[in-house]
Image (cartoon, rainbow, N blue to C red):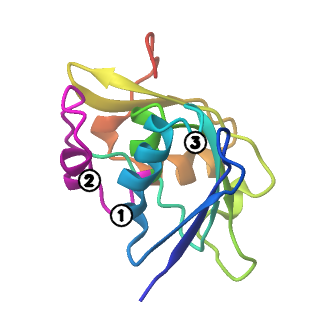
Amino acid sequence: MRLLLTLAIAVAAAVPDYILTEEHHHVLPHILALVSEGKVRPGATLVHLDSHHDAGLPSSWDHNDTRHDTQLAHTHINNFLFALGLLGAVEHVIFVEPPWSRQCNALHNKTTALRLGFVDGIPKVAYTATKADEQRVLGGLFDKSQIVERMEDGI
């Protein structure tokens, strides 16, 4: 059983909300509710502590349907972080990988900007990677069909 403990920094409340879920992506409707209640500002920064990046991009998405159950149906344990970005709840993700994990070595101690958006209603990502190993790691996060050269109107 994998557990995720997310601390949402409360803007309107004096006490932070804690959310404990078995599967990582089940935190998505809770974070969206905190945003809609004004307890977390839209475009927040999320600190993700895990040995896996969970930064895939949902392959199908109805961005016009804003019901939390529908959004959860399109997310999985490996892609909920960017789903939060596509929904505007999260703007920055700080991924902290433990020393024993070797999934993203090429990105250690680096900042990488990704631009998320929709092209014909389908989630897409654009990014610039300078070194070959960074390109390999980032390219491994997404299907080739999800990557575009430029994102004019990103989220």
* In the depicted structure, whether residue 95 falls above or below residue 11: below
Q: Sort mark 2 into few (<14), some (14-19) or many (20+) by Cα contacts within 10 Å.
A: some
Q: Sort mark 3 into few (<14), some (14-19) or many (20+) by Cα contacts within 10 Å.
A: many
Query: Which of these two is toward me, 14 or 102?
Result: 14
Residue 95 location, quadrant? bottom right
| Amino acid found under the numbered disc labelled 2 | Leu
Mark 2–mark 1 distance (CA, rounded to whole Å): 7 Å
The residue indicated by pointer 1 is 26
The residue indicated by pointer 2 is 72
Q: Is residue 63 magenta?
A: yes
| Amino acid found under the numbered disc labelled 1 | His
How many dots with numbers? 3
Contact check, label 2 and label 1, Cβ < 8 Å: yes
For label 1, the SS is helix
Give the residue at x 38% y 73%.
23
Pointer 3 or 1: first along the chain: 1
Question: Residue 131's spot in the image, x, y percent?
Answer: 69, 42
Question: Residue 6's spot in the image, x, y percent?
Answer: 58, 63
Q: Residue furthest top?
A: 152
Mark 3–mark 1 distance (CA, rounded to whole Å): 18 Å
Pointer 3 or 2: first along the chain: 3
Q: Which residues are magenta?
A: 59-80
* In the depicted structure, whether residue 45 falls above or below residue 27: above
